Image (cartoon, helix red, strand yellow):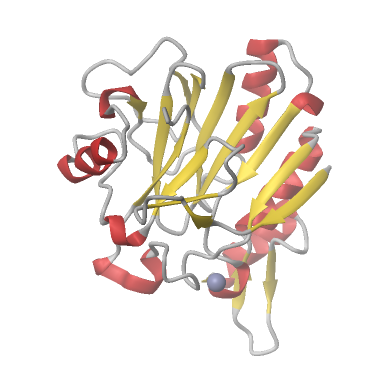
Amino acid sequence: MNSSVIELRQTPGSELWLEIDSAIPFRISADCAGDMGPSGEPAPHRERVLKQSGFDPACVLGVRQTHSTTLCDLRSGPPEPGGVEADGMIFDISRFAAGVTVADCMPVLLMVDGSVVAALLHSGWKGTGIVVNAVDELRSITGASASSISAILGPCICGSCYAVPAERAELFRSRFGVDAGWRDGEGESYIDLRAANLRLLEEAGVARATVVRNCTVCDPRLGSYRRDGSEFRRMLAVAGPFGE
Ligand SMILES: [Zn+2]
């Protein structure tokens, strides 16, 4: 798999958003944009920020996230009133934007060469593996091979900041490889969501991955539950047509 590491930058003309590259239809709200509310539920502040930024909130798909590995198919549009529980959306990126809320968990966008069908995922430690389900789903819907899928791994907590109970690090190490879970010289255990997801994408046969290097804890522009505790603000990671 061909992978590259990239730095987030301020979206030109807006301090509320950070982006990867103007060619990649993926943005994340900055911590200063405030709490973007739980995804898939009404959140007046999120709607205000989206409107200010030129999005139609009604066209930004969302799900009630539960740290699962479940996907839902929203190619024909928003879910029924009341919403749907899932941590990934299959959607038509030419017609809709999709958003997941994150604060240390990893947002992931998967796109298929030559297709408008994409997947936006919320992948925390519990939901690690949702990328595999999404690759399978995209392959079966589009008929494309995994080698025509590219992945963008958004900002998340980095391995050095993600101290966890020893059993969790062991689980990550045994399931996702030696870079995904370890114990340091002082007996602290850590996991690395990026390493785990890269391993899974590589095994699934995905051709390209772009990895955002910014850590939600280390980068003050980003929101982090680990860093800010009960004062944390959820960020909204949005993929889709940005309409400018
Ligand atoms: Zn960090």
Using residue 111 as the reference point, say whether residue 84 is left or right of it: left
Q: Nearer the viewer, residue 169 or 243?
A: 243
The quadrant of the picture occupied by the N terminus is top right
Q: Among all residues in the image, which is located at the extreme bottom?
A: 186
Figure label count = 0
Q: Is residue 56 above or below residue 124?
A: above
Q: Quadrant of the C terminus?
A: top left
**Which image quadrant is residue 162 in?**
bottom right
Left or right of 143? Residue 40 is left
Q: Is 41 drawn above or below residue 182 in the view shown?
A: above
Residue 3 spot, x, y in % from top left:
78, 48
Q: Nearer the viewer, residue 182 or 233?
A: 233
- Residue at point 62%, 68% (across, down): 159
Q: Residue furthest left?
A: 44
Q: Is residue 211 left or right of residue 168?
A: right
Give me the residue at 37% from left, 51% from top. Answer: 14
Say if residue 164 shows up in the picture. no
Residue 140, percent from left and from top: 67, 13
- Percent position (x, y) of residue 101? 37, 45
**What residue do we see at 45% from left, 16% from top?**
95
Q: Position of residue 49 (x, y in %)?
A: 25, 44
Residue 123 visible from this viewpoint: yes
Left or right of residue 204: residue 13:
left
Q: Decide: is 155 above or below 116.
A: below
The image quadrant in which ligand 1 is located: bottom right
